[in-house]
Amino acid sequence: MLRTKISELGKLSLQDDGGLVCSVTSDEPPPLDPPALRASFFWASPDPSELAIGDLVAHWDHGVARYCGTESLGSTGGGHVDFLVLEFAENGKLYVPTVRSDIVQKLGRTACQLSKLNSKSGRRPRSYCIEPLPNAYQWPGTGAFPEFPEKSQRPWGRRMSSKEQQQVEAQFLRAVAEWRRACIAYRTVLHADSSYRQAAQEYFGRQNSEPVPLLGWWAYRAVVLRVEPIELANDLNRDELALLIKQYVLRRDRSIEKMRREVETLENYERLESAAREPISEEVRLFVWRRDNGKCVRCGSGQRLEFDHIIPVIAGGSSTERNVQLLCESCNRSKGAKI
């Protein structure tokens, strides 16, 4: 059997509004038309308020930079414009209008690791929020996905004045804002379409039981995966490839479940240790001793008596006289073995 590498790119989710969306981070863009690709980048971009000074970010055209905050600069037409300030290698700075924050993304740990691995090849990681169904961006009855606007070029034969350049830039920013609104409207209509919702539910159901293709990747149990090298993956038969993907995801899920149980155990120990540091008060001990006549409430023995919590502290039991009783050591141990 040929050896392949399987890596996790992101998650697949069936949303409350009926849409099926996959969120991924990859150094290779999905095979989408340019407008849909830009929209998927825009949907995965954070609000500028989510950025903190020093965060690593990815610019759509220029790659990885460090976010240096915002700055308000005067415009030639009067007034001020707010910019995101990005610092690149060799101290190069770029000012991005806040209205174009859709072309800037905060990089997570996975993206940073991909960036280091692919620094020599020049490939840059980007995050995408994608409609994975075929024809999602040209769904029947929904129309074509909105085209990204082009910036006006200078008049033939002469340079534009600074005022004309400013007008062109303002017109382009307005067009981009309109494009963003159109993208959101398209997505809303798409997710409300009954045929799309049915197809999304069927696809999500299939990938829960068997690995299914997703834009050159694979989806299984809501995990988006890449199998590489692609050439070797293509040489595997479908059954072998499905087994490899299942093995990867099932082992991953089992590891996560094991960690979850270990964390729960450690948290229970912490609660138990915390409860042990709060002894039964002397007043409660005296009351219980007198109430139970200094004898085990189960066997009546007066030897080797212990104060026992009827409902264990770890289960929420209190240290009041209503929840404390006298048991001999033997009865207390037998009780503990049955809980």
Image (cartoon, helix red, strand yellow):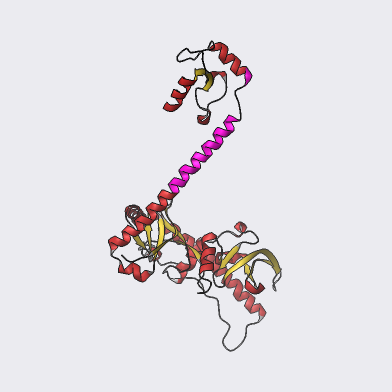
Would residue 227 be visible to someone looking at this image?
yes
Residue 326 lies, with reference to residue 194, above or below; the image says above
Percent of width and height locating residue 27 = 48, 68
So how many labels did they put on this image? Answer: 0
Residue 321 lies, with reference to residue 142, above or below; the image says above
Percent of width and height locating residue 207 = 34, 55
Percent of width and height locating residue 49 = 62, 57
Q: Main secondary structure of the magenta part?
A: helix
Residue 142 lies, with reference to residue 333, above or below; the image says below
> Who is closer to the viewer here, 108 or 48?
108
> Measuring 63% from the left and 79% from the top, which residue is drawn there?
164
Give residue 335's quadrant in the image. Answer: top left
25 vs 82, left or right, is left
Would residue 339 be visible to someone looking at this image?
no
> Who is closer to the viewer here, 316 or 278?
278
Percent of width and height locating residue 276 = 58, 30
Instruction: Report the residue that reaches farthest toward the bottom.
Output: 157
Magenta-colored span: 256-282
Task: Check residue 161 for magenta coloring.
Answer: no
> Measuring 45% from the left and 14% from the top, which residue is drawn there?
299
Task: Check residue 268 for magenta coloring.
Answer: yes
> Who is closer to the viewer here, 120 or 196?
120
Q: Image quadrant for the C terminus?
A: top left
> Measuring 31% from the left and 65% from the top, which residue is drawn there?
1
> Measuring 62% from the left and 66% from the top, which residue is drawn there?
66
